Amino acid sequence: MVDLKTKIHNIEFKNPVTLASGTCGFAREIADFYDPGLLGGFFLKGTTLKNRDGNAYPRLAETSSGMLNAVGLQNKGIDYFIENIYPQIKNYNTQLITNVNGSTIDDYVALTERVNELDKINAIELNISCPNVKEGGMAFGVSTAGAEKVTREVRKVYDKTLIVKLSPNVTDITEIARAVEAQGADAVSLVNTFLGMAIDAETRKPKLSTITGGLSGPAIKPIALRMVWQVANAVKIPVVGIGGIMSAADAIEFLLAGASVVQVGTALFKDPMLPVKIVNGLEDYLKHHNIQSVRELIDGLQM
């Protein structure tokens, strides 16, 4: 038997395969396909303090090597989550992590205080990197000062594991990572989507209502992998790797680059069963290479 367990701060994951926020709903949707307990965890759909309708349609566009989205954090707010969703998912045998969003620092703080009361939510993913909202979101994540301030204020009111989600739309992602680490982040997750756009040549109009949106999928994997490696070598806290994971081999590459946990996202739209296949593939890889624990892979890049 091989050991697939890994840790972020004081949270243990049964395996390093988790699902990315915004791609798996609130975990209950995945239950139609398989037991959520088969995976290490779920980074739940982005939640805000109040209801958000999101951006106007169209807000999804397929590209030749990925997907653009401009959903705009559509959700019914934290009250709805606590009253209607949390009771349905709280007993899943997996880690549940709430993705916290705000337009102002006060929003982030107030929302975090509400999530802090939920005993089955052991961590939050502080999203300071969403490129699809007109205010807040990525504005905090693209400057050191903004990232420091929102992380510092949220840290004051949150006593569980704080994971900060970083934007790749910056000059030096390691600078932002070190900044949030200094303000009390227990881990960082990266990367969020890259700002991009698509145009319909026939209509001569943008394919998204917002003109630009977030690019995810296979196209971003090499850049995401590079950034994960850079950040893992720049900070002492754990890293969650995200970006174009489409197979067990992709997930293993992120682990070798220094990620303690990986998130699968866009690939779910093609194959909802893929995360389970990645778990099985990771186990087969460890057995084939006579590696006893997945922890031996993390930051095990041969130079």
Image: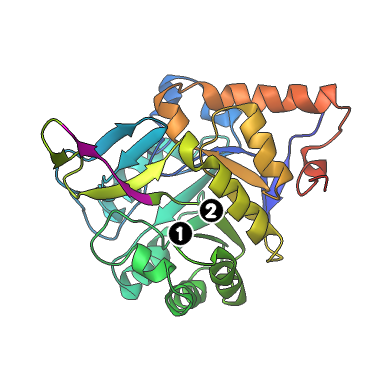
Q: Residue at point 35% right, 47% down?
A: 214
Amino acid carrying label 2: it is Leu
Q: Residue at x 41, y 64 (%)?
A: 112
Tags 1 and 2 touching, CB below 8 Å: no
Q: Is residue 156 magenta?
A: no
Residue 164: image location, x then y, percent: 51, 61
Predominant secondary structure, magenta span: strand
| Residue 70: % across, % down | 27, 46
For mark 1, give the secondary structure.
Answer: loop
Q: Which type of secondary structure does the marked residue at label 2 adopt?
A: strand
Q: Which mark is residue 190?
A: 2
At a point 32% along the width and 40% down the height, the residue shown is 68
Say few, some or many: other residues with alpha carbon within 10 Å of mark 1 (under 14 / 14 to 19 / 20 or more). Answer: many
Q: Is residue 29 above or below residue 273?
A: below
State the residue in front, 289 or 31: 289
**Magenta residues, as a range?**
195-201
For residue 167, the mark is 1
Place of residue 17 in the rendered image (x, y in percent of width and height, measured from the top left): 61, 36
Image vertical order of residue 32 relative to residue 77, above or below: above
Measured as percent of width and height from the top left, residue 5 is found at: 73, 39
Quadrant for residue 49, please give it: bottom left
Closer-to-camera residue (3/214): 214
Q: Quadrant of the N terminus?
A: top right
The image's colouring method is rainbow
Q: Could one spot residue 188 in this view of the protein?
A: yes
Marked residue nearer the N-terminal end (1 or 2) = 1
Q: CA distance from mark 1 to mark 2?
A: 7 Å
